[in-house]
Amino acid sequence: MPPTLTGLLRVGLVGSGNRQLFDCRRQIRHLKNSANLPVVEGNIPRGGEGLAVGQFADTRRIFSSNDIRDFARIIGDYNPLHESLDTRRPSGQLSDVLNGHPLIKVDENGMTKEVVHGILLSSLFSCIFGTLIPGSVYRSQTLDFRRPVFVDEAILGRVQIINIEKQRRLDGLIVRCSTYVLKDDKECVRGEAEVWIRHGTTAEKDL
């Protein structure tokens, strides 16, 4: 079990010597990073130095009811497909619009399962670029929604580099990537992104 921040602070305050205090601060920084930053895996180099066609990066996510509710509130999308309705109560009875809808799933407790907003799913691509290469700027993104994702389902967001263009005017690289959201290895969202990476560099050869 990892040490708590309080425990680390106590070690730093009670322990003698600068070395212990340095180790304490380093562990606190590590805990903060692991708690606040999303986990992104793959072989796209951090900082955008040494980019090559074929490199990829992944991040995994499970969107909760709170995530979906907060996103709906922020963007003002209150489509009932994104809500959990109790079909056993009169107030939760499905309207004519939703009755028989192919995206309606009802669990064993009579509750409908929220559909995750497609744009929320697609935000995983921005998460990957922003985490790996701070300062990168989106130029365009195409999206094709193939399958629905429901609340509490595990998904994988992936980007893979398919083209790199050097841009002197922009002082960096224009990188084009295939983008995917996968559930059980099946495509739910796919598209292409174009990202400007300032001061980015290329590897000697593509993968």
Image (tube, rainbow, N blue to C red):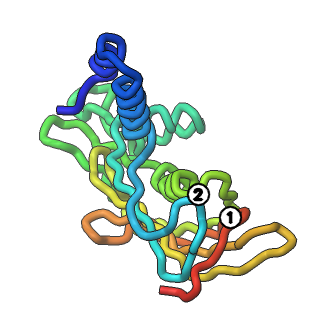
* Residue 179 on image: x %, y %: 50, 69
Residue 10 image offset from top left, x and y in percent: 30, 13
Foreground: 57 or 67? 57
Mark 2 neighbour class, 10 Å CA radius: few under 14, some 14 to 19, many 20 or more: some
Q: Quadrant of the N terminus?
A: top left
**SS of the residue under disc 1:** strand
> Which residue is most to the top?
14
- The answer to whether residue 61 is visible is yes
Q: Nearer the viewer, residue 92 or 3?
A: 3
Q: Indicate whether 175 appears above or below 9.
A: below
Q: How many marks?
A: 2
Q: Position of residue 130 (x, y in %)?
A: 57, 52
**Furthest residue toward right:** 169
Task: Give above or below for 15 relative to 181.
Answer: above
In this view, the residue farthest toward the front is: 17
First-in-chain label (1 vs 2): 2
Mark 1–mark 2 CB contact (< 8 Å): yes
Which residue appears at 50% of the width and 57% of the height? 128
Rendered position, 77 above or below 55: above
Number of the label disc, if any, that sits on residue 16: none
Residue assigned mark 2: 133
Q: Pointer 1: what residue?
A: 197
Report the side of 175 relative to 77 (left or right): right
